[in-house]
Amino acid sequence: MSKEKQANQELELGFFEPALGLIITNLEFLEDELQQEQQPVKELTKILDQFNELEAIEEFEKVVAELVNLTPVLEQTIFKIVDADQAKLLSYLYLANSIATNLKETALLMQIAGTIETKLEDGIFENNEENLVAEYKTLLTQFANHEYQEILNDLSTIQYQEEFKKVLNILSKEQDFDDLKEGNGVLMELFALANPVSNNSSYLTMWKRLNNLEGLFTVITFWEQDSFEDEE
């Protein structure tokens, strides 16, 4: 195996484990909430078991496809629970879903891994965990800036306060990863305040987009924390 290929596999495995842990945690939270509401969880539990029992990364995409296919069913189950915090339950689902889909071989996190591999081959920076995390933060910041600008362009589809637009404007230009993550949490709170949970495409699309960004930020944050703990 070439050093470059080995470096890329190590890079992918570096964030894969914390990302898988986040997928499982959010699905377990959702499973627990649905069980408390006496809603069916058989298919969800089956997918959780498959994620927990993964023995090879190659099996991952098959389980992700099952989760994606089950998502519309779980959405409708959540909307049946009138007294629950539906936004929170949808967040559990969307966080797990977005992290899982972004880990697929052709999706964002692996595309970034390919970009970083090229930079490693070109000797742009030294191959160590600190540099890899920093480069991921840089490339995800660029993605997030673009995504926030796209959300600004789509504001006519949702209800929003001026504060929401103001924060979006700031985040579309923000270069600090940690400030982006904090700002996304603020955006989610502002969106939830202005938009009661609704089973319509405009609400669901925006809530998915914000949770998608939250999932990406959280994966890298957990990866960085794991790396720091390993060094101690």
Image (cartoon, rainbow, N blue to C red):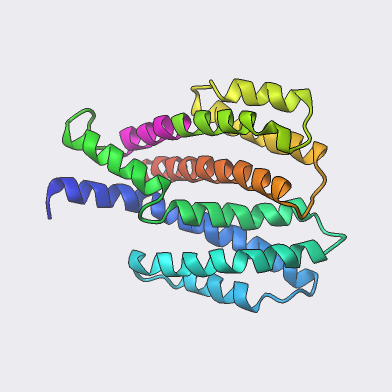
Residue 91 point in image, percent of width and height = 67, 52
Q: Decide: is 192 above or below 41.
A: above
Prevalent SS, magenta region: helix
Residue 221 point in image, percent of width and height = 49, 40
Q: Decide: is 175 above or below 189.
A: above
Does 53 sit left or right of 9 as displayed? right
Residue in the image at 58% along x and 25% along y: 171
Marker count (numbered):
0
Residue in the image at 55% along x and 63% along y: 68
Residue 109 vs residue 24, the one in the foreground? 109
Q: Quadrant of residue 118?
A: top left
Q: Decide: is 101 above or below 108.
A: below
- Quadrant where the N terminus is found in the figure: bottom left
Residue in the image at 58% along x and 59% along y: 25
Magenta-drawn segment: 129-141
* Residue lying at the far right of the rendered structure: 83
Residue in the image at 45% along x and 29% along y: 142
Q: Can residue 64 be seen in this view?
A: yes
Does 170 sit left or right of 101 as displayed? right
Residue 79 point in image, percent of width and height = 78, 62
Q: Quadrant of residue 125?
A: top left
Residue 209 point in image, percent of width and height = 60, 43
Does 73 sit left or right of 176 as displayed? right
* Residue lying at the far left of the rendered structure: 2
Residue 218 vs residue 152, the one in the foreground? 152
Does 129 sit left or right of 144 as displayed? left
Q: Decide: is 72 above or below 229.
A: below
Membership of 40 in magenta stretch: no
